[in-house]
Amino acid sequence: MKKLHRFLISLAVASMATTYASAATHTIKKGETLYTIAKANKTTVSQLCKLNGIRKSDTLIAGKVLKVPGAQKRVQAAQTAQHKVKSGETLSAIAIANKTTVDHLCTLNGLKKSDTLKVGKVLKVPGTTGAVATAAYKVRSGDALYAIAKRYKTDIATLKSLNGLKGNTLRAGQTIKVPAVKTVKVAAKTTKTSGRKLAQTLSSLPKSTYMKKEPSKKDVFNLGDIFFGKNTETEKETEVLKVAKTKLGNRYVWGATGTKDTFDCSGFTKYCYKKNGIDIPRTSIMQSKYGKFVKRSELKKGDLIFFDTSRGRKGYVNHVGIYMGDNKFIHASSAKKKVVITSLDKAFYSQRYMGARRPL
């Protein structure tokens, strides 16, 4: 009987040794739960509790070391590669470039979607999927990163990451990498033919269903623009304004570009655009020379608008804001000492308007 008892004890010890020999360790990070740790290591909460002699209700302490199944840890390590965060990159851009999801990146790295990425930080990315498939694109005269990104269903940060670009300037004839996506070739006469068909379709409907009079050529052209995506607000313009509106009421500080959530006028515009992967010059006078010139009658949401607010109107740009539509703009005002929305109809700004640019 005693021999049998000793044998059972030795068997149990051997079993425990085998279990812990196959276990690796995990240092708890702030915000992690037993569930997220179990999911990252392809195990269960029950298994983690069993390995570490803890209960599901126990509170996890950041910095504490837990045992995790080692076999799964090795598999995970074998399936991950490293990515060093570059300036302007977002979790979304990194996920797209590595053919994964933001949720998966967060799980791999113990991050939250709201976390700010620091330049130079090394992230784990899926290693077995490889880099995003790319194709070569030859830059044409007038091409901009934003337009190319939109054409290939990606974003500026991803294009810059693929090509090791620091700025947003491209030169005609330059060959860059773009995501390999299937493109639909459109015949040269598509717009004209589609416009004719659209007019025929509309003319066959009761007039009350689309307009009070027979469509003119101009009407057909404008309707075609709506159907084929012209003269519509882009996602990037919406995102720039979305960022700008979150800063309403923030304090104006001369020379500030977002430090402690304070801004001067050009620091504010630069911040809003940079958050969307567009790096514009720092000062209002340099911003007034960047991008495409826009007539006042053709202003669109997201355009930069410039003013001479100096005493006596000295004739040079010294203030900038972002056009919001409906003859309003958002800007960091030195007079109001905060970020505000102002009407262009206001005499002071209407009379001191100096022009507009479209950096998108």
Image (cartoon, grey):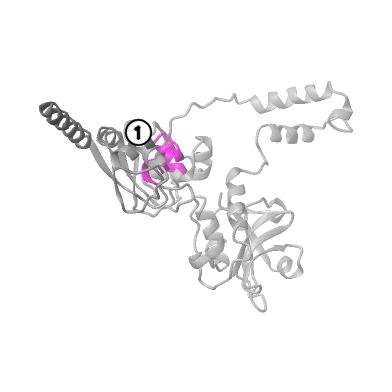
Q: Position of residue 237 (x, y in %)?
A: 60, 48
- 332 on left or right of 47: right
**Quadrant location, the N terminus:** top left
Q: What stretch is highlighted in magenta?
A: 92-110
The residue at 52%/44% (across/down) is 146
Q: Which residue lies furthest to the left in this view?
A: 3
Q: Where is residue 311 in the image (x, y as percent from the top left)?
A: 66, 79
Q: Which residue lies furthest to the front in this view?
A: 1
Q: What type of secondary structure mainly makes up the magenta span?
A: helix
**Is residue 172 visible to the viewer in this orientation of the structure?**
no
Q: Is mark 1 on a helix, strand or loop?
A: loop
Q: Is residue 96 found inside the magenta-colored segment of the image?
A: yes
Frontmost residue, 111 versus 331 = 111
Q: Relative to 122, is 227 above or below?
A: above
Residue denoted by label 1: 43
The answer to which image quadrant residue 175 occupies is: top left
Frontmost residue, 16 versus 312 = 16
- 183 on left or right of 299: left
Q: Where is residue 46 in the image (x, y as percent from the top left)?
A: 37, 35
